[in-house]
Image (spheres, rainbow, N blue to C red):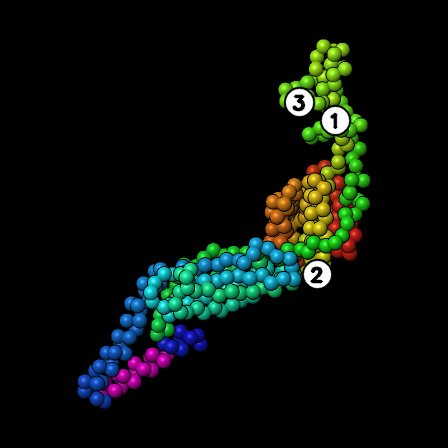
Amino acid sequence: MTAVAARRVGYGLALAAALLFQILDVGYLAHFLLWTVLALPVVSLLLTLPLVFRCRGGLTAAAAGLERGKELRFRAEVRYRGFLPLPMARMRLRLTNEMTGEELFHQVTLSGVPGRGGGLHKWMAWDADHCGRVRCEIERLRVVDGLGLFALPIPRPQACAALALPRLLDLPLPPLLRGETEAAGPLKPRPGGGPGEDYDLRPYRAGDPVTTIHWKLSSKRDELVVRETLEPRQEGIALTFDHFGSWDEVDGVLDRLLTWSTALLKEGRSHTVAWLHPVTGELRRFLVADRRTQSRCLSAILSDPTPPNGRSIRTEKAGGKERQFHLLPNGEVAV
């Protein structure tokens, strides 16, 4: 039996006792007691309604993301402004790791005088033992009147989320992922120019630095010629992994994925991250060129479920012309 139901039963017993007293005694006290018991719910409801119209729920995450193994914290609150204390606000919260499917429920009760921010709040914690996008939502939000007889709904806020991120490991880039994996192909102009052994000659274009002009050859041709520095074309890289298996195995794969992706970005090398959606089999493919695109890719990875079994991307083409490197659960990289 809920608290509201218990209070309704108690009020019903009080009302029955007042009626019995009225039947047995027709004096002034019996009338006064009966009408007082009848009026109390109405008065309580009238005092609570202005608060209900002003109340709004709120949900925020303390941090957008933290490494797994740390504690994610969420703040649930009821915002309102008024001089009357809030009798009681009751909410049911659900926290879900969208990757692992783990769930945690909280029953929260708030009451009292609003603080400086104009509301009451409570913090909830999630021990992020595994990677994933942890979503926090309020399933039910009610304001209860002073007598506890009426539970009135108020607008629920939008859900919020925080990421339990993979760990950055102290691992060097494997030789396969370093610059040793050149692609055989023509040279390309180096952005910004600079010194170099390989270069090409072409006519001067407006905006070319004066330092790149080949003066000796220009004097012979009676036109300006510039020296354009060339560099080898680096082979495109696609990091792939399987989004299924045990949670510990997937955590380990994602740790190495984030570590090597970050190392590639530090070297100025963009790359592709690809996997198959574990349920639909759809190819999920993200170009990671900077921290912002890496964050978008991580959010998508941590939002997909992780079933025990699925179809491996090793049997598929990750798309594009990149060389595919598949991260295995045992710590190895397969080409």
Determine contact: label 2, label 1, CB under 8 Å.
Answer: no
Please state which of residues 215 and 106 is positioned toward the viewer in this rendering: 215
Label 2: which secondary element: helix
| Residue 208 marker | 3
What's the magenta region? Answer: 9-23
Report x, y in % for residue 69.
65, 62
* Position above or below: 143 against 245: below
| Residue 42 marker | none
Instruction: Give the residue drawn at x 65%, y 53%.
Output: 278
Q: Which mark sits nearer the N-terminus, 2 or 3?
A: 3
* Position above or below: 260 against 226: below
Report x, y in % for residue 106.
51, 68
To which quarter of the image does residue 286 belong?
Answer: top right
| Residue 248 marker | 2
| Residue 229 marker | 1
Q: Amino acid at mark 1?
A: Thr
Q: Is residue 219 visible?
A: yes
